[in-house]
Image (cartoon, rainbow, N blue to C red):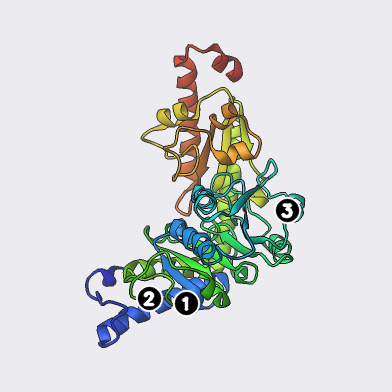
């Protein structure tokens, strides 16, 4: 990315000089790398400011264009990212769509029978994320695609969490619209992309108007350095090394969970089994403890969260944990730990020791005897 902050600072939309051509070539190369990641073509990739904007462009753009059509129902899973749920609220409030929420089981998988029962020829689109950001559930996208397309509905997939978790090279065959994020695959923040199947370009109304860049779907000067960074990240996750890395990541996560559960504390895993979840995701319930107390005791040595970073400031239990059947108390005693590419075995051993000591201190300080009863 570095040269594009200074030495190669051309505008990629300037068509009359070589500096602009060089910038445009860099953006085109990045689009090709992202397209290769999901098995698409570069002209089907629209750069955005992130996955949130990509989700908005997909669903609001489609909803606005089709507002006068006969298909007035949109289905979303109950564990979608908060931005998708909010987009649904806007579509319902301002454009008259009926938004229906698809139930999930205790592991976060969309109930296929429920999906089949509500699909009809009045459904415009179905939005189901590929990999859940809180409990790591990996949905069966090919199977969902088969069901959804049987009624002629469009399939939107929020795949922000997917590159680190699964091979995406054939995803363009199964979905019509797909959102991805730069920083969720170790690229820069502030950049994302939306895959729009080529024949659907005319069905998406832009959210941003101006000079008509990016096939008139998203106007504005593209940030070349961010596009280049996201393209480089896509190259990494479209390699054989990525498969090996996911395997190693899963092993470390499994060992981390096993060692934590083996401690004296009442700790249990939330969500699907290892093979069906993001290899770096673990969501654990610490029965009898308050998650915020634990996180506070761990600072400044260990970073974890009670839910999505986009909603962690909201003082309410995670909607994802509630959707899979947890009570408010159970949800409020749960913490998500994310293990990444740079996490070492030594890091995990240190984290386990920190968690153990923090729980001990909370038990010793707490006037509530149920902590000690649970620990004993």
For the residue labelled by badge 3, is the local secondary structure a helix, a strand or a loop? Answer: helix
Identify the residue at the far left of this view.
6
Quadrant where the C terminus lies? top right
Nearest the camera: 119 or 362? 119
Q: Are marks 2 and 3 in contact (CB under 8 Å)?
A: no
Residue 333 in the image, given as x and y percentages of width and height: 54, 29
Mark 1 — residue? Answer: 32
Which circle, 1 or 3, is nearer the viewer? 3
Label 3 CA crowd tier, 10 Å (few <14, some 14–19, many 20+): few
Q: CA distance from mark 2 to mark 1?
A: 17 Å
Identify the residue at the far front of this view.
68
Task: Name the mark on residue 210.
Answer: none
Mark 3 — residue? Answer: 118
Label 2 CA crowd tier, 10 Å (few <14, some 14–19, many 20+): some
Residue 221 in the image, given as x and y percentages of width and height: 31, 71
Whether residue 85 is situated above or below residue 38 in the rendered picture: above
For the residue labelled by badge 1, is the local secondary structure a helix, a strand or a loop? Answer: helix
The residue depicted at 41 percent of the width and 61 percent of the height is: 187
Q: CA distance from mark 2 to mark 3?
A: 38 Å
For the residue labelled by badge 2, is the local secondary structure a helix, a strand or a loop? Answer: loop
Quadrant where the N terminus lies? bottom left
The residue depicted at 56 percent of the width and 15 percent of the height is: 372
Mark 2 — residue? Answer: 213
Q: CA distance from mark 1 to mark 3?
A: 37 Å
Earlier-in-chain disc, 2 versus 1: 1
Quadrant in the picture for residue 3 = bottom left
Quadrant in the picture for residue 264 = top right
Earlier-in-chain disc, 2 versus 3: 3
Nearest the camera: 241 or 184? 184
Residue 157 in the image, given as x and y percentages of width and height: 58, 60
Q: Is residue 47 left or right of residue 103?
A: left
Q: Is residue 221 left or right of residue 303?
A: left
């Amino acid at each position: 990315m570095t040269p594009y902050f200074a030495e190669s600072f051309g505008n990629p939309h300037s068509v009359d000089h070589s500096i602009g051509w060089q910038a445009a070539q860099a953006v085109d190369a990045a689009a090709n790398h992202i397209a290769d990641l999901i098995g698409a073509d570069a002209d089907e990739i629209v750069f955005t400011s992130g996955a949130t904007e990509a989700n908005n462009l997909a669903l609001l753009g489609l909803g606005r264009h089709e507002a006068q059509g006969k298909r007035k129902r949109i289905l979303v899973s109950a564990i979608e990212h908060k931005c998708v749920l909010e987009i649904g609220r806007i579509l319902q409030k301002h454009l008259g769509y009926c938004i229906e929420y698809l139930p999930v089981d205790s592991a976060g998988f969309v109930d296929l029978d429920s999906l089949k029962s509500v699909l009809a020829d009045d459904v415009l689109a179905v939005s189901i994320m590929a990999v859940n950001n809180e409990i790591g559930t990996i949905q069966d996208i090919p199977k969902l695609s088969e069901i959804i397309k049987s009624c002629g509905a469009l399939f939107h997939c929020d795949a922000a969490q997917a590159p680190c978790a699964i091979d995406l090279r054939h995803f363009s065959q199964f979905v019509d619209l797909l959102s991805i994020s730069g920083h969720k695959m170790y690229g820069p923040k502030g950049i994302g992309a939306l895959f729009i199947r080529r024949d659907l370009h005319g069905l998406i109304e832009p959210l941003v108007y101006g000079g008509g860049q990016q096939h008139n779907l998203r106007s504005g000067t593209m940030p070349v350095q961010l596009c280049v960074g996201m393209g480089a990240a896509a190259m990494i996750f479209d390699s054989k090394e990525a498969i090996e890395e996911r395997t190693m990541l899963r092993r470390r996560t499994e060992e981390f969970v096993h060692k934590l559960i083996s401690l004296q504390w009442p700790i249990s895993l939330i969500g699907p089994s290892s093979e069906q979840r993001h290899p770096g995701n673990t969501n654990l319930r610490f029965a009898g403890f308050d998650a915020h107390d634990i996180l506070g005791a761990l600072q400044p040595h260990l970073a974890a969260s009670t839910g999505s970073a986009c909603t962690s400031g909201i003082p309410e239990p995670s909607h994802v944990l509630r959707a899979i059947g947890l009570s408010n108390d159970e949800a409020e005693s749960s913490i998500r730990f994310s293990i990444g590419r740079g996490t070492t075995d030594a890091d995990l051993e240190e984290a386990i020791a920190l968690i153990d000591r923090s729980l001990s201190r909370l038990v010793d300080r707490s006037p509530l005897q149920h902590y000690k009863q649970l620990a004993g």
